[in-house]
Image (cartoon, coloured by chain):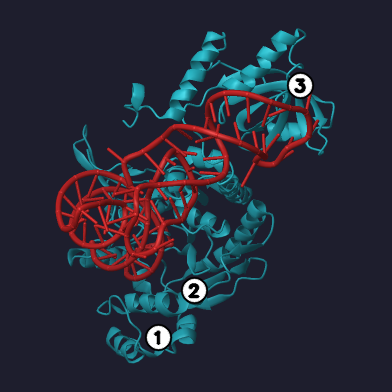
RNA sequence: GCACCGGUAGCUCAAUCGGUAGAGCAGCUGGCUCUUAACCAGCGGGUUCGGGGUUCAAGUCCCUGCCGGUGUACCA
């Protein structure tokens, strides 16, 4: 829709490239050939010794033409390699060789694709280089390239990730790291007996989290559908069905505000392990996180802005009460109801967004306000108020808290997990309470999910469930300020505004 | 939602108090057989995000719309 250019309206740079494309055709060179047989990727060729013969290909990203000798740099996702051409080294006949040489220097533009065949040698400065004996045109780029050493920045990198990936090596590294994270997570779970499954994204009902869904409509069935906000209740149905250890890499959708640490479309890994409690799960989590950080980054200490985060030490386990007491001076156990807690918070002059909320929410707000901003090193926070955890098991020791933990790293909640509530009677009561809140106008309160309650009535073993925000975790270990930096194509409003 | 900041050449950026837009790279022409962001000489390139206003004069000031960022709120 932006490409309505014609004739004189075309950008000069684009026009010149189209002219070269036509000249290539006129010389009998197909500007978009169908294939090229390579012997090595650029990274593979870079690892070879001098004297090896290679056929390599990639994007032309730099060219240094010195008259009778030209150096050029090819790049692909994983590497780059220098090639050289001489004016008389491309054919037996000097005139023919010169013609082939000049086709390269005159008709190739940066970001075109090219294939090269020749022998590896080292230049005077020691760089491994292909001495080109023959080259093949592999694809013309019409759009002008980014600055070859400043790359691209900002919005353009999100809107045109393909440009970002070519122009910025850090971007290529960041997304390769994301792939390693996902692979390491799957490897670890698979090795511990977990099975990967897929559950519905289009659902009748949004369940498993406190969030507003995206709503759509199914035409043939003439019924409303929602996009899932979490895979949780489906994975637990599978535990009912006999899956002892199950996980899903689940794309989830929440129709809420966006900021650097929230996307409307994100990836959550959830797993469920029968016969585990949340403490078993904490031990497993610690091993898993350490494995993934090691595999993905090659170490256990990462840089995060000003400070360093060390995953090698045991992660301390601290109760919500403990960290709130430490950072606000308030003992929530001594303030058993909403009114007394609210008064104490007021006396401490702590400013809350929603001071009229119930006790559980007050505790949560207090925690996020006072304690969480201080949690830098990996820390397990345990024993959350029960009314913030409608799907979690009530603690046997303290009915006001849930058998739950979160892993907090550099103030970000990376993992949320608990011993699952498996008692269908208690679950019905808790969901009815949520439904009451919903009736009272809380749009994020959970809906009464009869289908799930029905599944629970068929019997569940003890279960511990677990969820990790993959985008957040990757952003954390790549020191990315915005979640959009670790998502290949983040949702943006269309550029250009109206009409 | 609200508050603040930003949008200038293909890319990355500059432009003092309001005085009529500039650099590097990319492009074009020429030179150069060991370059590394090659280098040297010369040339072309602008709806300053869109619309309106103030002014002799607007990239700059005012209003408005679009897009983006950051902070704040809920969530992972």
Mark 3 to mark 2 CA distance (whole Å): 62 Å
Q: Is residue A295 left or right of residue A486?
A: right
Relative to A59, residue A117 above or below: above
User: Which color was chain B given?
Assistant: red
Of B62 and A223, the residue lying toward us: B62
In the rendered image, residue A116, in percent from the top left (x then y), is placed at 69, 22
Q: Identify residue for label 2.
A: A382
Q: Are marks 2 and 1 on the same chain?
A: yes
Mark 3 surroundings: few (<14), some (14-19) or many (≥20) residues within 10 A = many
Whether label 2 touches label 1, CB < 8 Å: no
Mark 2 residue crowding within 10 angstroms, few (<14) / some (14–19) / many (20+)? many
Q: Total number of numbered labels? A: 3
* Local secondary structure at mark 2: strand
Identify which residue, A365 or A124, lies in the foreground.
A124
Q: Nearer the viewer, mark 1 or mark 3?
A: 3
Do labels 1 and 3 touch, CB within 8 Å?
no
**Relative to A271, residue A408 above or below:** below
Image: A182 above or below A359: above
Q: Sequence order check: which comes first, mark 1 or mark 3?
A: 3
Looking at the image, tell me whether mark 3 or mark 2 is earlier in sequence order. 3
**Which residue corresponds to the image point at 49% horizontal and 81% vertical from the top-left?**
A323
């Amino acid at each position: 829709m932006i490409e309505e250019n014609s004739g004189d309206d075309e950008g000069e740079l684009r026009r010149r490239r189209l002219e070269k494309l036509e000249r290539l055709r006129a010389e009998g060179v197909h500007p978009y050939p169908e294939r090229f047989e390579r012997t090595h990727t650029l990274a593979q060729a870079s690892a070879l010794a001098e004297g090896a013969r290679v056929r390599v290909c990639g994007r032309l990203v730099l060219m240094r033409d010195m008259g009778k000798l030209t150096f050029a740099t090819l790049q692909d996702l994983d590497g780059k390699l220098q090639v050289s051409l001489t004016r008389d080294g491309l054919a037996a006949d000097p005139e023919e060789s010169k013609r082939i040489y000049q086709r390269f220097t005159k008709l190739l533009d940066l970001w075109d694709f090219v294939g090269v065949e020749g022998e590896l040698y080292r230049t005077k400065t020691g760089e491994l280089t292909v001495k080109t004996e023959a080259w093949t045109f592999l694809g013309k780029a019409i759009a002008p390239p980014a600055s070859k050493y400043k790359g691209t920045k900002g919005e353009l990198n999100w809107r045109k990730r393909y440009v970002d990936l070519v122009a910025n090596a850090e971007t290529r590294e960041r997304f390769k790291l994301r792939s390693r994270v996902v692979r390491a997570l799957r490897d670890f779970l698979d090795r511990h007996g977990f099975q990967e499954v897929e559950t519905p994204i289009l659902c009748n009902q949004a369940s498993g989290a406190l969030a507003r869904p995206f709503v759509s409509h199914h035409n043939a069935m003439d019924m409303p559908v929602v996009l899932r906000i979490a895979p949780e209740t489906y994975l637990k149905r599978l535990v009912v069905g006999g899956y002892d250890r199950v996980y899903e890499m689940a794309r989830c959708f929440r129709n809420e505000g966006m900021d650097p640490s929230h996307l409307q479309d994100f990836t959550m890994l959830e797993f469920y392990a029968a016969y585990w409690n949340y403490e078993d799960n904490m031990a497993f989590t610690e091993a898993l996180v350490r494995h993934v950080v090691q595999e993905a980054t090659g170490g256990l200490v990462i840089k995060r802005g000003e400070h360093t985060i060390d995953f090698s030490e045991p992660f301390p386990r601290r109760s919500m009460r403990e960290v709130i007491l430490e950072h606000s001076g308030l003992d929530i156990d001594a303030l058993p109801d909403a009114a007394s807690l609210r008064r104490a918070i007021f006396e401490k002059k702590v400013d809350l967004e929603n001071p009229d909320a119930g006790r559980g929410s007050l505790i949560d707000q207090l925690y996020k306000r006072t304690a969480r901003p201080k949690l830098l090193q990996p820390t397990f926070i345990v024993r959350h108020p029960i009314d913030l955890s409608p799907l979690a098991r009530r603690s046997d020791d303290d009915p006001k808290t849930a058998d739950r933990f979160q892993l907090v790293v550099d103030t970000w909640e990376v993992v949320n997990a608990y011993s699952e509530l498996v008692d269908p009677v208690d679950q019905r009561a808790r969901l009815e309470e949520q439904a009451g809140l919903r009736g009272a106008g809380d749009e994020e309160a959970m809906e009464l999910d009869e289908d799930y309650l029905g599944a629970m009535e068929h019997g569940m073993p003890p279960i511990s469930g677990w969820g990790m925000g993959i985008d957040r975790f990757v952003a954390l270990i790549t020191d990315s300020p915005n979640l959009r930096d670790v998502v290949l194509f983040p949702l943006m409003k269309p550029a250009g505004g109206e009409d």
